[in-house]
Image (cartoon, coloured by chain):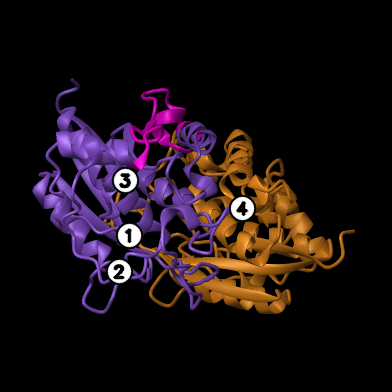
Chain colours: A orange, B purple
C-alpha cells in the first residue's frame, strides 16, 4: 500500500483502463487520469472516461486534444472500415486496421510529460498482451523500452532524483481475468465504453474486435455485461 | 547517396532543424517535414518552418496541432518568464525553464507515426548535445533509447520488415560547426527563426538562450547572421 503517492493513469474509458485506474486507486495512489481526444471514431469513449474518473474519485481528469488524423493510416482515425465478425474466434491474425500508428508511444509520452510536471514517477497503462488485438505497442518489451526512455528523457531522471515506473497490472491477464478483477474492485461496468464503432445512439456494435473480446471476457467470467449492444 | 528513400524530418524552423533538413535533402532523401503547433510562445517559428520546407523542396510539410499547454510546466508554453542574458557565457547551468517536459519524446512519437504510415524507416532530428540548452531529451543516449522503442512499437518492426533509424547528424557539432555546415549547404539563414521570445513584430530578442547560442555560433564561424534582432 503506497499512500499519497501520485500516479498518472491513462484512461480511454474502456474496460481495461477503467480497471487499471480502479487498481491504482485501491493501492492508495492519488490518480491523475489522462484521456485523449485524437479524432477517434468512437469519441463517445471520452464521456465514459469522464464518468469513470469521477466514479473512481480520480484527483484530476484531463483530456489532451491531439491531432492523430494528420497522418491517417488507421480504421479508428481515417475512412477505413472497422472489421466486424460474428465471434471472437473469427478475429483475424496479425495487426488489424484498427491499429493507430505509434498511438501508445504518443499516449505514454504525454503521460510522461504530465508526470514530469506533477513530479510523479508512477504511470499506469491498462495494456494487455493476452486477449488483445495484436497491437505491437501493447507488448511487455515495448513497455520496458518506454520505461528506459522515460528515465533518460526527463529532468528528474537526469538529476537521478527518481525512477519512472510504467505499471501494467493487466498485461498478463485474460479478458475474463480483467472482468473478474474489475468485479472484485466493484467497478461499475455500465460506465465503461469499449466499442470501436458505436451506433449513432452511442450503443456498442457488438461485432468489432473490441466488443467481441469484451463479450468473450464477460462470458468466460460468468458475469453479465450491463451495457447495451445494438446487435 | 541514398536516392529516393523517404525520410520524416522534424522541422521547428530554427537553424538546427533547417540544417538537418538540408542535409537529408543533400543526401537524396525525399523529405517529409513535420512541425508542431503546440501553443509555443514563439509560434512565429511555424512560418519559418513553412518557408524553409518550401525553399529546400521538401516533398511535403505538415504541421500537427497538439496540446502541450494542457500540462504547462515550461516557459515556452506557460506563463513563466524566458531567461534573458547579455552573452552566451551567462547561460545558467542545469535544465532551464524553457525545457518543455517530454517534448522530444512526443515529437519523435509523432514522427514515428508518420513514418509508419509512409512506410519509411528514416527519421531526422536536428538535436545537438554540444552548444545546447541542457535539455535531457537532446542527449545521444536518449536518441538510442528512442530508436529501440521505434523498432518495438511499430508494425514494420514487429514484422521484421525494416529497421527504423533516428538520424542525428548535428549531435556532435558545435553551433559554429552547424553554421559552417549550413553555409556549405547554401541554407538561406534569413528564412530561419530561433528566438524563444520574439517581439510583437516577430524580430528575435537577442537575449534568450536560443538567440545567444545562435549569435555565438555565427560569431565563431565568422559569418554574418542576416536576421534582424530587436536588441
Name the outermost residue toward the top. Answer: B1
Give the Cα distance between marks 4 and 2.
24 Å
Identify the element where label 4 is drawn. Answer: helix
For marks 3 and 1 on the same chain, the one whose residue lies earlier in the sequence: 1
Pick whichever, A203 or A77, lies toward us.
A77
Residue highlighted by disc 1: B36
Left or right, B28 with respect to A182, comes to left
Pick whichever, B42 or A77, lies toward us.
B42
Which of the chains bears the disc numbered 1? B
Q: Within 10 angstroms of label 3, few (less than 14), some, or many (20 or more) residues?
A: many
Res A167 seen here: no
- Residue A99 sits above or below residue A142 on the image: below
Percent from the top left, x then y, of residue A58?
A: 70, 74
Q: Do dots 3 and 1 share one subunit?
A: yes
Q: How many marks?
A: 4
Give the Cα distance between marks 3 and 4.
26 Å
Q: Within 10 angstroms of label 1, few (less than 14), some, or many (20 or more) residues?
A: many
Mark whose residue sits in front, 2 or 1? 2
Residue highlighted by disc 4: A155
Q: Do dots 3 and 2 share one subunit?
A: yes
Which of the chains bears the disc numbered 4? A
Give the Cα distance between marks 2 and 1.
9 Å
Pick whichever, B221 or B152, lies toward us.
B221
Please tell me whether residue B201 belongs to the stretch shown in magenta. Answer: no
- Residue B28 sits above or below residue A113 on the image: above
Give the Cα distance between marks 3 and 1.
25 Å
Percent from the top left, x then y, of residue B194?
A: 30, 58
Residue highlighted by disc 2: B43
Magenta-tinted stretch = B151-175
Give the Cα distance between marks 3 and 2.
23 Å
Residue highlighted by disc 3: B217
Q: Within 10 angstroms of label 4, few (less than 14), some, or many (20 or more) residues?
A: many
Amino acid at each position: 500500500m503506497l499512500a499519497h503517492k501520485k500516479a498518472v493513469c491513462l484512461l480511454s474509458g474502456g474496460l481495461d483502463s477503467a480497471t487499471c485506474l480502479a487498481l491504482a486507486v485501491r493501492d492508495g495512489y492519488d490518480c491523475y487520469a489522462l484521456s485523449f481526444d485524437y479524432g477517434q471514431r468512437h469519441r463517445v469513449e471520452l464521456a465514459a472516461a469522464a464518468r469513470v474518473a469521477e466514479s473512481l474519485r480520480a484527483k484530476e481528469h484531463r483530456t489532451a486534444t491531439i491531432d492523430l488524423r494528420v497522418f491517417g493510416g488507421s480504421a479508428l482515425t481515417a475512412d477505413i472500415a472497422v472489421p466486424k465478425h460474428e465471434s471472437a474466434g473469427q478475429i483475424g491474425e496479425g495487426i488489424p486496421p484498427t491499429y493507430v500508428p505509434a498511438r501508445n508511444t504518443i499516449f505514454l509520452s504525454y503521460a510522461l510529460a504530465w508526470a514530469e510536471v506533477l513530479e510523479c514517477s508512477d504511470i499506469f497503462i491498462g495494456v494487455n498482451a493476452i486477449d488483445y488485438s495484436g497491437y505491437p505497442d501493447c507488448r511487455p518489451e515495448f513497455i520496458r523500452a518506454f520505461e528506459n526512455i522515460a528515465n533518460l528523457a526527463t529532468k528528474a531522471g537526469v538529476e537521478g532524483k527518481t525512477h519512472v515506473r510504467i505499471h501494467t497490472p493487466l498485461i498478463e491477464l485474460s479478458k475474463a481475468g480483467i472482468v473478474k478483477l474489475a468485479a472484485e474492485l466493484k467497478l461499475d461496468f455500465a460506465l465503461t465504453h469499449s466499442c470501436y464503432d458505436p451506433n449513432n445512439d452511442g450503443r456498442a456494435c457488438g461485432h468489432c474486435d473490441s466488443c467481441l473480446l469484451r463479450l468473450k471476457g464477460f462470458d468466460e467470467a460468468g458475469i453479465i455485461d450491463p451495457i447495451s449492444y445494438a446487435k
